[in-house]
Image (tube, coloured by chain):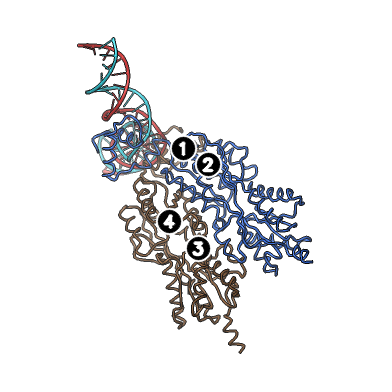
Chain colours: A brown, B blue, C cyan, D red
DNA sequence: CGGAGTCCCTAAACCGGTTTAGTCAACCGC
DNA sequence: GCGGTTGACTAAACCGGTTTAGGGACTCCG
């Protein structure tokens, strides 16, 4: 010890007033010499704070890996947390029942000070549930919404709209949509953006199919659309994985992409630019999203207010999976 | 309270002797009625255990999302941890220097009881470092090795060997390898498996290139190989992402897969079966690996011994990106 | 010169469990 | 009937910090 009481050390370490500058320096020097760091456990107990925030992900282990969202989002969260000595507690659970139990347990035994709420569903009970539990939360959603908690949003609608407008500009009229599972808010958001963009171009809403974000689901949805009475000349997918599988399914049927079918994805995943043809897709800054969400949650945990945040809109990345429809060409040449 | 002291409650909750069965039931009933759960913080402090294990991942945020390994591995870990009320503390850091600091900090402030060591490198300083820090660890590697800690291994060599033998059986003689970054143990392991399988088939070691597991790296490596004096008729890639990008790069050059070039991947990622052509690849049970690693680490943390574990070898998944080389066909038909 | 006001720092309570030492009643055998 | 065990439980110390109450020295002011 540097000749002071443990209370003084506590003051010195937390930059609180009431310690002479000289003493503070002496204490810090002693701590450095002894390679001493305050025990996280004791600090958490006495300050009644867990110094940890939680993320509960309700997805089957397999589908987790296929989605580029979570790894990037987590990386973003980490960027912010690490700088403040906080940590992320991660839980992966198989279904919604387990998800509820997870939140209950996290709140009951005080393992975390707050949580992130992702994959928001329609009429999602979680915001109210967490309010009842008194566990601070930040909601990750495609746009601000009525909610007891701050919402950190990246509006995916401009991205989808840009994709549709791009296709319309290329001459497409029959533009279908392969959406995610109905229950998600972002599914509805992307679906609405697609429909809205069609309407804005004075086109009737064309066919859409709900799939499950998986490769198999995307392929199957694509086949369904292509088999319909009026097959689309372009398909806007709600994520890259389904778009890639759909593109392959179309190619397997002998269709040429983009001549016979244009395809757009969503995510701009790592492979998107290295396919045949390279995938036109929508890129969102998921890392930045995670960073912003973490900053918001930390403010909230500290008792500060955190207004809703809306991040810059996503960007359409033009590659070669989109082009003018063959019918247009034929008309042109005829 | 159920008319007993807090010590008695502690005994009752931890199934320790010295509490009458009737009393125990009464205590548990009272706890349930009060919806009371022991405070994680207090328990961690007094029992000198963090009830948490850590995983430090040193990868750039972007590359993290591209790799199906971590999400699946984490999901496996969670399966085991959740069942025992333990939690996973995740840290994503950009480089090896930060990685060291992370381990130091985790050990110093006692946030975790043990850690997982992944992406083991040649002459990796981390096992010794953690031994010096006194922080239990479990090493995730492709095969058992000299190490102060238990090693949980999935031997990837049989998978690579199976891929090579499959290609040899198809008639390939010029089989190249696109490996991962040199520094990783699993890179060397897969490279050795490729070379060993060639030798076992009485073939000379053919060309190999180190890439970085990214799509761009895989494409570039592929072009290098195809531009060489003796281009391969088949390429064994160290992961799916590079294989997919390589396959597209070859196709873009006008090559037909598999007629002009056969391709195998590693991971069996979600898209692998939904490409054109579907990718022949090696599947490992990463979720099971995470589960086994977590079980081992928990034993270690409890002071029990944990022998090295070797999981079932990976499995070659045959799809259509591999086939007889065109030269062979010509020879056959000639 | 005495009292109020500051500034620094210490002593001790406190967070909510675990764990050791010790109390007390019932039971045992001789 | 009495010392010795045993079983069930309580009281209190303890984990390692944070935080409140308070004490001593010094300054300022009338």
Q: Are marks 4 and 1 in contact (CB under 8 Å)?
A: no
Q: CA distance from mark 4 to mark 1?
A: 46 Å
Dot 4 crowding, Cα within 10 Å, few <14, some 14–19, many 20+: many
Q: Tag 4, which secondary structure?
A: strand
Q: CA distance from mark 4 to mark 3?
A: 15 Å
Disc number for residue A27: 1
In this picture, residue B205 sits left or right of residue A301: right
In this picture, residue A154 sits left or right of residue A255: left
Residue B14 location (% of width, % of height): 36, 36
Dot 3 crowding, Cα within 10 Å, few <14, some 14–19, many 20+: many
Q: Chain of mark 2?
A: B
Q: CA distance from mark 1 to mark 2?
A: 21 Å
Which residue is tagged 4? A58
Vertical side of A229 occupied by B133: above or below: above
First-in-chain label (1 vs 3):
1
Which residue is tagged 3? A214
């Amino acid at each position: 010890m540097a000749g002071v009481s443990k209370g003084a050390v506590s003051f010195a370490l937390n930059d609180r007033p009431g310690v002479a500058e000289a003493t503070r320096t002496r204490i810090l020097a002693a701590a450095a010499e002894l390679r001493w760091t305050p025990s996280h456990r004791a600090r958490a107990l006495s300050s009644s704070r867990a110094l940890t925030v939680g993320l509960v992900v309700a997805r089957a282990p397999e589908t987790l890996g296929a989605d580029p969202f979570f790894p990037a989002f987590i990386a973003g969260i980490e960027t912010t947390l690490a700088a403040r000595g906080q940590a992320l507690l991660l839980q992966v659970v198989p279904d919604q029942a387990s998800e509820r139990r997870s939140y209950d347990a996290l709140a009951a035994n005080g393992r975390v000070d707050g949580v992130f709420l992702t994959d928001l569903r329609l009429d999602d009970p979680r915001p109210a549930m967490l309010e009842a539990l008194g566990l601070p939360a930040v909601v990750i959603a495609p746009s601000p919404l009525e909610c007891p908690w701050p919402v950190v949003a990246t509006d995916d609608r401009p991205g989808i709209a840009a994709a549709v407008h791009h296709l319309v500009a290329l001459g497409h009229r029959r533009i279908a949509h392969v959406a995610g599972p109905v229950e998600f808010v972002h599914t509805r958001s992307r679906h609405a953006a697609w429909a809205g963009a069609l309407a804005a171009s004075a086109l009737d809403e064309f066919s859409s199919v709900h799939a499950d974000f998986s490769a198999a689901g995307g392929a199957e949805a694509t086949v369904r659309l292509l088999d319909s009475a009026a097959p689309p000349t372009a398909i806007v997918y709600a994520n890259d994985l389904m778009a890639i599988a759909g593109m392959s399914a179309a190619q397997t049927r002998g269709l040429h992409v983009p001549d016979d079918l244009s395809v757009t994805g969503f995510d701009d995943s790592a492979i998107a630019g290295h396919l045949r043809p390279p995938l036109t897709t929508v890129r969102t800054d998921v890392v930045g999203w995670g960073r912003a969400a973490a900053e918001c949650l930390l403010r909230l945990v500290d008792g500060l207010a955190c207004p809703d945040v809306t991040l810059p809109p996503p960007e359409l990345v033009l590659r070669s999976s989109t082009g003018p429809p063959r019918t247009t060409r034929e008309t042109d040449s005829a």
